[in-house]
Image (spheres, rainbow, N blue to C red):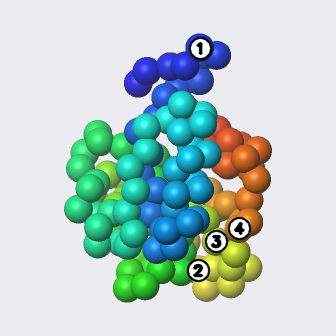
């Protein structure tokens, strides 16, 4: 894994969100940190990109057309159990109450989130 000047790792990150403006905004923020980012607009497209060792982090929305973020997280973890997954959602309470996170999601980002929130979530899941 490469590092930036300050010693922080440069990550290969997959961002999954069905809203283009949200997806592009997250990509722009991550590239501002120096990371390399690929995007997908749904769960099926994301799964097609996930191969062992390709990414060091996945950031996914929860409410997407077709496959929801928790389903995507479970499928990714089945392929690559050590790959950290951050779920971005405005529906944290509902998600926690539903029990759908069950260990497949490593951290939650509450939408809308700040640059600092994003940076801190990455630091919590990537060592």
Q: Nearer the viewer, mark 1 or mark 2?
A: 1
- Local crowd at mark 3 within 10 Å, few (<14), some, or many (≥20)? some
Kindly identify which numbered label has been placed on residue 99.
Answer: 2
Residue 8 lies, in percent from the top left, at 59, 24
Which of the image's four quarters has the C terminus? Answer: top right
- Separation of marks 3 and 2 at Cα, in angstroms: 15 Å
Which mark lies nearer to you, 3 or 2? 3
Q: Position of residue 90 (x, y in %)?
A: 70, 75
Residue, disc 3: 89
Q: Position of residue 115 (x, y in %)?
A: 73, 47
On screen, residue 10 versus residue 48, left or right, reads: right
Query: Which circle's residue, 1 or 4, is located before the other in the chain?
Result: 1
In this figure, which residue is indicated by the disc labeled 1? 5
92, 28: nearer the viewer: 28
* Distance CA(mark 1)–CA(mark 4): 30 Å
CA gap, disc 1 and disc 2: 40 Å
Badge 1 crowding class, 10 Å Cα cut-off, few under 14, some 14 to 19, many 20 or more, is: few
In the structure shown, which secondary structural element does the residue marked by tag 2 occupy? loop
In the image, is residue 8 above or below residue 95?
A: above
- Circles 3 and 4, Cβ within 8 Å, touching? The answer is yes
Structural crowding at the residue carrying mark 4, measured as other residues with C-alpha within 10 Å and reported as few (<14), some (14–19) or many (≥20): some
Q: Mark 4 highlights which residue? A: 111
- Residue 16 is situated, as x and y percent measured from the top left of the image, at 45, 63
Question: Which of the two labelled residues, at mark 3 and mark 4, occupies the earlier sequence position?
Answer: 3
Q: Residue at x 61, y 45 (%)?
A: 29
CA gap between label 3 and label 1 equals 31 Å
């Amino acid at each position: 894994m490469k590092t930036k000047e300050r010693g922080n790792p440069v990550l290969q990150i997959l961002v999954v969100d069905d809203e283009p403006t949200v997806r592009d905004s997250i990509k722009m923020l991550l590239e501002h940190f120096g990371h390399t980012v690929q995007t997908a607009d749904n769960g099926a497209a994301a799964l097609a990109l996930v191969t062992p060792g390709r990414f060091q982090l996945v950031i996914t929305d929860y409410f997407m057309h077709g496959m929801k973020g928790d389903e995507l997280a479970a499928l990714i973890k089945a392929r690559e159990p050590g790959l950290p997954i951050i779920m971005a959602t405005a529906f944290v309470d509902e998600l926690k109450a539903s029990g759908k996170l069950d260990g497949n999601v490593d951290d939650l980002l509450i939408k809308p989130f700040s640059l600092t929130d994003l940076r801190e979530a990455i630091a919590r899941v990537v060592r």
